[in-house]
Image (cartoon, coloured by chain):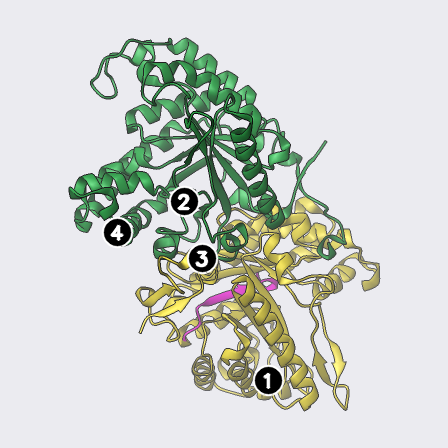
Chain colours: A yellow, B green
Amino acid sequence: MPVTLPAGKLRKLKMLADPVGRFQMMAVDQRGSVAATLAKTMGVDAKAVTYDDLAETKAVITRTLSPYATAVLTDPEYGYPYSGHTIPGNVAVLLAYEESGYEKAGPEGNERRSRTIEGWSVAKAKRAGADAIKFLVYAHPDASDETRKHQQEIVRRVGEECAEHELPFLLEVVSYSLNHASGTPGFAREKPGLVIRNAVEYSRPEYRVDILKLEFPCELKYTAEYAHGLFDGQAREPVYTLDEVQGYCRRLDEACALPWVILSAGVGIREFQEDIHLSTEAGASGYLCGRAVWKGVLDLYPDVAAMEEHCRTEGVYNWMQCSAANLKALPWFEHRRFGGWDNIRIEGRSPEWHRR
Amino acid sequence: MPVTLPAGKLRKLKMLADPVGRFQMMAVDQRGSVAATLAKTMGVDAKAVTYDDLAETKAVITRTLSPYATAVLTDPEYGYPYSGHTIPGNVAVLLAYEESGYEKAGPEGNERRSRTIEGWSVAKAKRAGADAIKFLVYAHPDASDETRKHQQEIVRRVGEECAEHELPFLLEVVSYSLNHASGTPGFAREKPGLVIRNAVEYSRPEYRVDILKLEFPCELKYTAEYAHGLFDGQAREPVYTLDEVQGYCRRLDEACALPWVILSAGVGIREFQEDIHLSTEAGASGYLCGRAVWKGVLDLYPDVAAMEEHCRTEGVYNWMQCSAANLKALPWFEHRRFGGWDNIRIEGRSPEWHRR
């Protein structure tokens, strides 16, 4: 049975990937995390980081690294209005729709709620030239009903807006623990279950998501074969073996009813390369990667010449490592949802198509 | 003074051109002219040419030649719903908005009126993934007031629709004579004046056009240096010299307050190459070319294998001739309207941009 897609969604999905259907996308839509690092570099309080500091930093990254990506994700606050026009014409544009960060919620205040950016919409993004929409949702499958419903409802609403405008909807799902801080062995243990259960939920057709942007389901730093300090010089007590990690990756792929890409979450480039290898081996269709590639640039602000030099050397080198690790990614149209390129048609094609 | 453009228009203009800003665009949106030629090939009446004959012919051209273009212009009736998804993701899409052909008008019935495609709109084109809109207007500067106003009004309306959706508006202006048939010496003599005066009219800001798609202002077959049958083996009495033709090209460029591209109007590839050379020498920013490159394929219908072979050999060779002739095209952002890439900004950029 052929699978049909609305013309706009099909066209734009194709634009996000390389000619073979693999996603190699760069993220420069970070706001809170970039501001925090710039504050350290400048030796000031995070609140003293200005709009221009963020806009200028994003502009350097965007103009130097965009040409290497199949698509660039930026934000409509500090990124797109200042540096969107420097993204090459043959590189697609994704615009972020979530307010940076989250609101604390739940009976114990340890749950997370997301919001869309005030004053922004999918209609505006489309008018401004976006080829796809990205929304980041924080998710915990055992959060209170109220929190889960809030998060599901906002994703559903974004999905509807995207459907109305026939823009691909890329949903980033970020898990958190109710008990453990990120980076701890406790969180490392919980993570596979959280990531997989969240993927099941947000694969459901009612959300109208086109691509899932997911965390690597484990912490490689806590994996026996990597736990001796390979990535950051720090040895840790492992919580799983590489074999188990590969099993979690396969289970994550089975949980995804949609093509999925792996996110970098600020890990170092060496670790992210392994994440890409293991994810694509399990069925991921590529990556959407930001800080792993360019975070070094934040230490050089405000020396724009040094930042550009860093991006053009270290940044490009890092990017090439990601591309190399991505060679075996599953083309998005080969995902079981689609069954191959030749199985896909434009929805409603007929002599009357243009009247609808 | 920096020039500002709405984010969507700027992004999409960039997508239509190569990285240097030159347009090398392929047209496969012809409807009436393709049907007429297919009828000859098939030895049937034009009315016996079916929807599928047109859709299949366009599909062959689109899938074989699109990868060579910076953008592809197709139509929403026979073209896009059947073959739009075969245009590569890094090649932009223009969709036609005019009904093929024209309605006879004016006191003597020798004037021409244009219409938009019934049931189609810029909103629909945008939703379906178009990166720009093309409208063809027939124009005669001395037509009756009624006809001129009708044509100006429809262009103004399309311009407004495009502005609302921030899609680039490419206006094709086709001249005609009130007294002479196309291809005659009488028309050749009138043509420079018609093309130049039409360009002045439709450069006016009230139409909100972004790119003009114009006829070559002369008939090279009636130019002394080419009149001995170089292009079609037929010698003609010349009506101008090459020096005069170059003068008309310069006057056309002066008349254009916008970047402009040259159209092929079904002339042969050898003649069109000369058109490109002379136009770009005068300041054109590239070409939008259809039949000059692929018309041979129409003689081979319905032998799809032979058609594909023809496109992949003759068609690609023809395309390369056009690209080669286009090397000195003026990057669109170097047009005096813009004053260079570094002079262009996204309109309304500010921390409040996303709220507007």
Task: Calculate the distance from the C-alpha at mark 2 to the C-alpha at mark 1.
Answer: 49 Å
Label 1 Cα neighbours within 10 Å, binned few <14 / some 14-19 / many ≥20: many
Identify the residue under disc 4: B50
Label 1 is placed on what type of residue?
Ala
Foreground label between 2 and 4: 4
Mark 2, chain letter? B
Identify the residue under disc 3: A355
| SS assignment at label 1 | helix
Task: Calculate the distance from the C-alpha at mark 4 to the C-alpha at mark 1.
Answer: 63 Å
Position of residue B197 measured from the top left corner of the image (x, y, whole percent): 52, 21
Mark 4, chain letter? B
Q: Residue A134 carries which label?
A: none
| SS assignment at label 4 | loop
Label 4 is placed on what type of residue?
Thr
| SS assignment at label 2 | strand
Label 3 is placed on what type of residue?
Arg
